[in-house]
Structure formats: structure tokens, C-alpha cells
Image: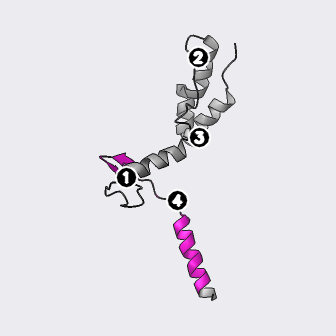
Amino acid sequence: MSLIEALTKLAEDLERAKPKPFDPRPRFENGRYRDCKWCQGRGCVSCKIEADKEYARQFPSGPQPIATFDMTNEADIERAKKVIGRDAIEKAFGPNGGGVQEIIDNAKANPPLND
């Protein structure tokens, strides 16, 4: 393989490895799965199967909460304020905030209290 062929192949591989740009369309709507490998989101009999496979890959044990709170326990209410309170949300989604990952990190840093 010549150097030019190798560089061309490398460029193609890098192009394929780029993350997909954000797509505002819902992943599955009206029987169409936007990432279907067979029809590329135009709608086919495989869309539901492909959507179900991707969901099972992303959530093998189903969706799980990032945090739970007991709103009858005063200490847990304070923990909730630290994790998802107004100040926490404004900090996470404000300038230099970490977004959703910061909320997840806050939940990990403030684990549930064992009474």
C-alpha cells in the first residue's frame, strides 16, 4: 500500500469516527427510527427492531434514576437541594458549568443517607 493510499484510508477512517452532529429529531417517531441502518430514518419494517436493539444496548437493565430522595426526611431534603436545587441547577447550566454531568457528579458526591 502506498503512502497516498494509506493516508486516504486514514482520512476516511477519521471521518467515519467523528461524532454525529446533534439531531433535534426524536429518535423514534411515527414508526421511523432516525438511526436505522436499513433505511437511515425514512421508515421501514426494521425501524422498531433497530430502535429496540439500541435501547437495550444503552439501558441493559432499563432506565435507572441518577438519584432518589425521601421528601419526608429533613436531611434528604437538604441533600436534594445540594444535588438538584435551584443553586445547583443554575451553577451546572450557567457559565462554566458542567451541565448534566455536573448534576450526576453532585448526586454521586451526596449519596443517600442510611438511617
Q: Earlier in the sequence, mark 1 or mark 2?
A: 1
Residue that label 4 marks: 19
Residue that label 1 marks: 47
Kindly state the secondary structure of the residue where label 4 is placed: loop
Q: Quadrant of residue 110?
A: top right
Magenta stretch: residue 6 in it?
yes
Q: Amino acid at mark 2?
A: Ile
Kindly state the secondary structure of the residue where label 2 is placed: helix
Label 3 and label 4: CA atoms lie apart by 18 Å
Q: Earlier in the sequence, mark 4 or mark 1?
A: 4
Query: Which residue sits furthest bottom?
Result: 2
Q: Is residue 83 above or below residue 14?
A: above
The location of residue 87, given as percent across then percent down, is 56, 28
Q: Earlier in the sequence, mark 4 or mark 2?
A: 4
Q: Which residues, given as a range, are shown in magenta?
A: 5-33
Q: Nearer the viewer, mark 4 or mark 1?
A: 1
The location of residue 65, given as percent across then percent down, is 55, 30
